[in-house]
Structures are given as structure tokens and as C-alpha cells.
Image (tube, grey):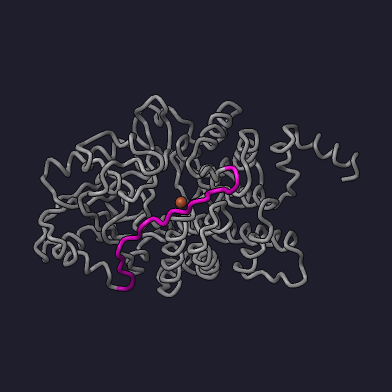
């Protein structure tokens, strides 16, 4: 039966979740858990987490449990295809029998994809983009020890990898596949307290992106929507405290719950164009995924608002706004006001052109493409068009509540690069419906009495 013309996402998929440990001291169980899995020699996959001592402490923990360790500590932010293939090579050369990722989404995604590459005897990682592309669900075990309050990558079946080697490069692709899922996910708020404040803010906005996109998206997976909305409420309650006092255990624990629940939600409810936007900008300017989401979130909520006003009204209430006596449209305005206030409070820049060029430069990956990139983000029309095309092809785009056109994508991107962060009327994005300049659309609307 072809139901695709009747329903959007007529068949929901329930992606599996790994076993998980959560709480203060959970990371100390990683070594004994590896031994219980029968592992003898694991590969740590990490960016190094320099200055925290976490990697050395974990190494001792594993060795005390009788599990020897080799360390790959060259994972980059927005992991690149070469990071994954280097990890696979090190895993093979050292005859390891399991992976342990330590860090945030970049480390987990590198290990998740490397184990799938290992299961396929070294096939190129870029072959696994898209939905359920793995041919083998059996992979080497992976213990994912999380240290951030954002991606939820330790528990999700999703990966994001930047392709810098194929003809599509630069291309930041998404994969969803049960084969990527870790064997054991560990969340310990104490580890998250080692993050610098700006990373708490950035990763917190990734959590907010996951929760809100899973809640308003087209999939409408009823086992996920309560979790998604709860995660939004918890980000609102805890992100400011966690950002400005990273030693506040209660706030960090709240953010850990938020990030975990948001990740569980989007694992099956999928995402939307905020992630498509973030992937596109990251492909061209290798900056933090959560920072991208922080800059883009108010714009994308504004674009999506007319397609889902009741759901944005729910988000407004989850963010503590008083919506009594308001229509869903009026209440949904309050969600956008609340998220702009949260972004400002947490130091998210108004737009991409305000992102510190030194920060952009320091984030750039290696290789010819990034070596020639400008450090200040001032995309010209051609680059906006290319990023808009990237958004249209993203795996997250079909889940968005409002249909995206390439013109609308470009307009949202231009807004993110140059405009102040503010709630606009949906007139600002009318071009996407009528295919004309928004000012002209407004004039026509006024002439028609609209
Ligand atoms: Fe994300």
C-alpha cells in the first residue's frame, strides 16, 4: 500500500537505545564494564580534553580493570572523514577489540563511524551517509563516556561527519543507523563540570535544538514528544546557571538530563532545518555545532512558527512564559522572545558575522579547503546559494514542519549571517511562499488589505 501521499512519515521507526549509566561516579564504572564485556585492549577515541586529566584518569581506570589502552587523541571538532579513517587504522594496527569514546559529539561520532567502518573491513566512511546504509549490524563494542551537555551522541543512532575527500566536499553529512549506536552510554555530570562556560552554552543550545526540533517536526513520534518538551523546559531552567557556574552540580545534572532526553527524543522523532542550517555553515566554516544552533534557532523558529503555532505555544509554556488568555499565535511569539533572551543571556552572538574571527580561525580543520577560508564569516551570494543547496539536501530537512525552498533557505542563512537576532513577522520569510522579494510581497498584501 502506498500511503506516502496520505501521511507524512506513515511508518515510525523506533531506533534502539543503548544500555546507559547516569550519575555522579558513573564514569568510574567504565573500566569494569569493559572487562565485563570481555574486552582486552581498547582504543580510546578523544580530542584529548587537555587540561582536564580525564583521559589519563580513565586510562588508569581501564588498566586497573585489566583492560589495556591505546589512545587516538586527534579527533577534531566537526569530525572529518580522515579522523574516522585514522581511528579505524589505529584500531586495526593495534589489534584492539573495542572502542571507548571520551568527550562530546565529535569523539562519539568518530568512534561510532569507525566501528562501522571496521565491521565493513575498512570501507570509506563517506559510504555510510543517509538512512540505514550499514550492511552489518554487528560491530566492535563501543563504550561512550560523555563530557558535554549537548549532542547526546553517546546514545543516538545518528552521526555527522564532514566529507573533505569526495567530489561533494565540503559536505557535512548525517547518518542514521542502528549500527552506529553505542554498546554502553555513560553520563556523569561531574565530567561535564570540566567544560569551559562557552561550551556549556553552545552545547546547551544543541540540546534545545534537539528537543524543539523533535517536538515540532513532522514525524510526530508520540513516544518522543513528551521527552522533547521536557528537555526544553529543563534547558530553560538550568542553562544559565550551568553556563555561569560550571561548578553548580544541580544545574549541570539538570542539563545532563536535558541533553539525554532530547537525544532520546530525536533518535526516533528526527530533526529539522535548524540542523540542516548548522551542518551547512559548519561545512564551510568549521565552527562549533552548538554555536551554529544558537545563532540559527530564533530564525528557524520564526520560519516554522506559521506551520506549528500550537506546538510553539507549548514551547513558550515550557520556557516559563505566561500564555494565559493568548491565542496560539500570540503564545508562540513568546517562545521566540524567550529563546532570544536565553541566547543573549548565554552570550550567543547576534549573527555569524559577529563571531570572533580568531575563534573561527582556531576552529578551522586541516587540509586545503580550510586553509584558504576567510576567518570572518561574511558569505557572498554565491556562498549563501551553495549553503542553501546544502540545506536542501540534508537528511534533517524532510522532518521540518514547514516545507523548505532553496530561496527560503538562502534567506534564513542571509539573516543568520548579517541581521540582528530578533523576532520578525512571517513576512520576513514570505519570499519562500510567493517566490518574490519580501518587501514586494508586503506591498501586495497591503494592497489586498492583508
Ligand atoms: Fe545537534
**Front-most of residues 6 and 243:** 6
The stretch drawn in magenta includes residue 23 = yes
Counting from the top left corner in percent of width and height, residue 442 is at 82, 40
Counting from the top left corner in percent of width and height, residue 197 is at 44, 60
Going 55% across and 43% down the picture, which residue do you hit? Answer: 4
**Front-most of residues 251 and 110:** 110
Q: Main secondary structure of the magenta part?
A: loop
The stretch drawn in magenta includes residue 349 = no
Q: How many marks?
A: 0
Q: In the picture provided, is 193 more to the left or to the right than 269?
A: left
**Front-most of residues 266 and 440:** 266
For residue 342, above or below residue 371: below
- Does residue 239 show up? no
Q: In the picture provided, is 290 more to the left or to the right than 378?
A: left
* Residue 379: quadrant of the picture: top right
Which residues, given as a range, are shown in magenta? 5-24
Q: In the picture provided, is 425 more to the left or to the right than 366?
A: right
- Residue furthest to the front: 1
Counting from the top left corner in percent of width and height, residue 402 is at 63, 46
Going 28% across and 33% down the picture, which residue do you hit? Answer: 124
**Front-most of residues 307 and 236:** 307
Going 22% across and 65% down the picture, which residue do you hit? Answer: 30
Q: In the picture provided, is 67 more to the left or to the right than 328?
A: left
Counting from the top left corner in percent of width and height, residue 352 is at 56, 42
- Does residue 276 show up? yes
Considering the image in quadrants, where does the C terminus appear? top right
Amino acid at each position: 500500500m502506498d500511503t506516502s501521499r496520505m501521511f507524512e512519515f506513515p511508518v515510525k521507526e523506533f531506533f534502539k537505545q543503548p544500555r546507559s549509566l547516569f550519575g555522579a561516579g558513573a564514569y568510574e564504572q567504565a573500566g569494569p564494564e569493559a572487562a565485563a564485556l570481555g574486552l582486552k585492549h581498547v582504543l580510546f577515541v578523544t580530542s584529548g580534553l587537555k587540561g582536564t586529566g580525564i583521559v589519563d584518569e580513565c586510562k588508569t581506570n581501564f588498566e586497573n580493570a585489566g583492560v589495556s589502552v591505546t589512545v587516538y587523541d586527534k579527533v577534531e571538532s566537526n569530525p572529518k572523514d580522515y579522523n574516522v579513517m585514522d581511528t579505524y587504522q589505529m584500531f586495526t594496527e593495534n589489534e584492539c577489540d573495542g572502542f571507548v569514546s571520551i568527550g562530546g559529539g565529535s569523539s562519539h561520532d568518530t568512534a561510532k563511524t569507525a566501528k562501522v567502518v571496521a565491521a565493513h573491513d575498512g570501507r570509506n566512511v563517506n559510504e555510510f551517509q543517509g538512512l540505514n546504509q550499514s550492511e552489518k549490524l554487528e560491530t566492535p563494542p563501543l563504550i561512550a563516556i560523555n563530557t558535554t551537555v549537548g549532542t547526546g551522541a553517546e546514545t543516538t543512532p545518528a552521526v555527522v561527519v564532514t566529507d573533505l575527500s569526495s567530489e561533494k566536499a565540503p559536505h557535512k553529512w548525517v547518518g542514521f543507523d542502528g549500527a552506529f549506536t553505542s554498546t554502553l552510554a555513560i553520563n556523569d555530570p561531574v565530567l561535564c563540570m570540566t567544560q569551559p562556560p562557552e561550551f556549556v552554552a553552545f552545547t546547551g543550545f544543541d540540546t534545545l535544538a534537539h528537543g524543539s526540533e523533535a517536538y515540532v517536526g513532522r514525524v510526530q513520534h508520540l513516544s518522543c514528544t513528551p521527552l522533547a518538551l521536557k528537555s526544553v523546559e529543563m534547558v530553560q531552567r538550568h542553562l544559565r546557571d550551568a553556563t555561569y557556574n560550571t561548578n553548580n552540580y544541580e544545574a549541570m545534572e539538570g542539563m545532563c538530563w536535558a541533553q539525554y532526553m532530547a537525544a532520546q527524543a530525536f533518535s526516533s522523532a528526527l530533526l529539522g532545518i535548524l540542523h540542516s542550517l548548522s551542518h551547512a555553515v559548519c561545512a564551510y566554516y568549521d565552527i562549533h555545532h552548538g554555536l551554529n544552533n544558537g545563532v540559527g534557532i530564533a530564525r528557524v523558529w520564526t520560519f516554522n512558527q506559521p506551520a506549528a503555532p500550537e506546538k510553539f505555544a507549548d514551547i513558550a509554556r515550557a520556557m516559563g512564559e505566561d500564555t494565559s488568555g493568548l491565542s496560539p499565535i500570540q503564545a508562540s511569539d513568546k517562545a521566540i522572545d524567550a529563546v532570544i533572551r536565553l541566547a543573549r543571556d548565554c552570550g550567543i552572538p547576534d549573527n555569524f558575522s559577529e563571531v570572533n574571527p580568531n575563534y573561527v580561525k582556531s576552529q578551522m580543520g586541516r587540509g586545503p579547503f580550510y586553509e584558504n577560508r576567510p576567518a570572518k564569516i561574511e558569505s557572498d551570494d554565491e556562498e549563501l546559494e551553495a549553503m542553501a543547496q546544502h540545506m536542501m539536501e540534508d537528511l534533517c530537512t524532510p522532518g521540518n514542519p514547514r516545507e523548505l525552498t532553496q530561496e527560503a533557505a538562502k534567506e534564513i542563512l542571509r539573516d543568520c549571517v548579517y541581521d540582528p537576532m530578533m523576532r520578525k513577522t512571517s513576512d520576513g520569510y514570505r519570499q519562500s511562499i510567493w517566490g518574490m522579494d519580501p518587501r514586494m510581497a508586503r506591498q501586495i498584501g497591503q494592497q489586498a488589505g492583508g
